[in-house]
Amino acid sequence: DLRPFEGVSLTPSASMPAPHGEGEGGGEGGGSGSGGGSGFSPRSRSPFVRDAVSALITGLTVAPFVTALDRAVVRITAGTSTSLSAALGTEISQFAKKPFLYFTCPGFRIVASLYACTYLAANCADTWHDMANVKDDSKKMKSAGFTRFVATSAVNLPLSVLQDRAFARLFGNVRPRELPFLSYALFMTRDAGTMLASFYAPKHVAQALAKQASAYGDEPEAATTTAVVVPRWADVVATVACPIAMQFVTAPMHSLALDMYNRKSAGVLDRARFVAKMWPSTFVGRGARIAPAYSIGLLLNRTMR
């Protein structure tokens, strides 16, 4: 796991005495029945409470920034704003004039719920993985990164599609109607890429950075052990860079999905020109949106946990 603070672990150390009644193979009272280590004790529920509180606070913290950027990108794609700066100016003006209405608007509630649920899924996946490793040290246990990716994708993909559907209807330039099936598919592919880059790729990228640093002598201690020692800087760089870099690949999917909703009868070449024209601004807008949502949000969430 790539938590910034390595001093906190859910796994008890070998030198730490086991709590009363929780010895090896023992259930309550130190018996050797099948109950030993086979279930979650009342104490084991506290990490999940911590997971929920961390996810809620992180979601509420990143939601104002993400809401403004999401709405700005949708306005640009729909043609209701001429540039990203103009769209952001509209959002900032609305926030400054009526902050209470901004925090209670449907857009903010949707975004806050989306990210709180996504981080809750990631946190619970990490906690479950740690507890499962305590009970079973088998090498066949799936990696924490893969478990986290599956959990967050299962939660984030359908919720993100519902958010995009709601934003397209709220801020589009046509009368609200059902999104085309291909738009749903593009949104889900885009979000799957973001989940992969946010919750799975950073671990491997950080390890690659650590190996590269040790090869050049910047981290000599990493070369003396079998397992790669991942320094803090590599973890931070990978966590911040991976989600943003993925937006360069997924930005055309976002533009095409919205264009298919806003211009139902446009031709293939016309759509291709539109996507190419929108690629730079969409990448900047999506990258600026992902930075607080996952790059900074991940670091905040890990620190709180």
Image (tube, helix red, strand yellow):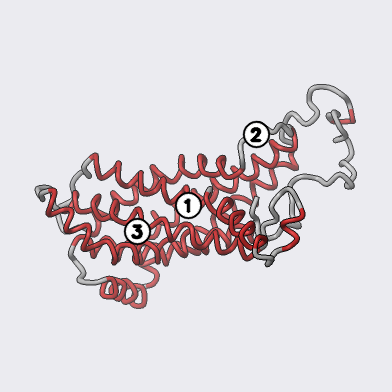
Q: CA distance from mark 2 to mark 1?
A: 22 Å
Q: State left or right for residue 253 relative to residue 237.
A: left
**Nearest to N terminus: mark 2 or mark 1:** 2
Q: CA distance from mark 3 to mark 1?
A: 25 Å
**Nearest to N terminus: mark 3 or mark 2:** 3
Is 3 above or below relative to 292? Answer: above
- Please, what secondary structure does the residue beneath circle 1 have? helix
User: Depth check: 26 or 43 in front?
Assistant: 26
Based on the displayed image, in which of its 4 quarters is residue 189 positioned? top left
Q: Amino acid at mark 2?
A: Met
Q: State left or right for residue 281 relative to residue 67.
A: left
Whether residues under marks 3 and 1 lie with C-beta atoms below 8 angstroms apart, the answer is no
Q: Amino acid at mark 1?
A: Ala
Residue 74's x, y, as percent?
A: 27, 60
Q: Which mark is residue 31?
A: none
Residue 58's x, y, as percent?
A: 53, 59
Q: CA distance from mark 3 to mark 2?
A: 39 Å
Q: State left or right for residue 245 relative to residue 143.
A: left
Q: How many marks?
A: 3
Q: Which residue is mark 1?
A: 197
Q: Which mark is residue 107?
A: 3
Q: State left or right for residue 267 relative to residue 97.
A: left
Q: Which mark is residue 141?
A: 2
Q: Quadrant of the C terminus?
A: bottom right
Tell me the residue at 75%/42% (across/down): 43
Residue 153's x, y, as percent?
A: 46, 43
Tell me the residue at 50%/64% (across/down): 61
Q: Amino acid at mark 3?
A: Gly
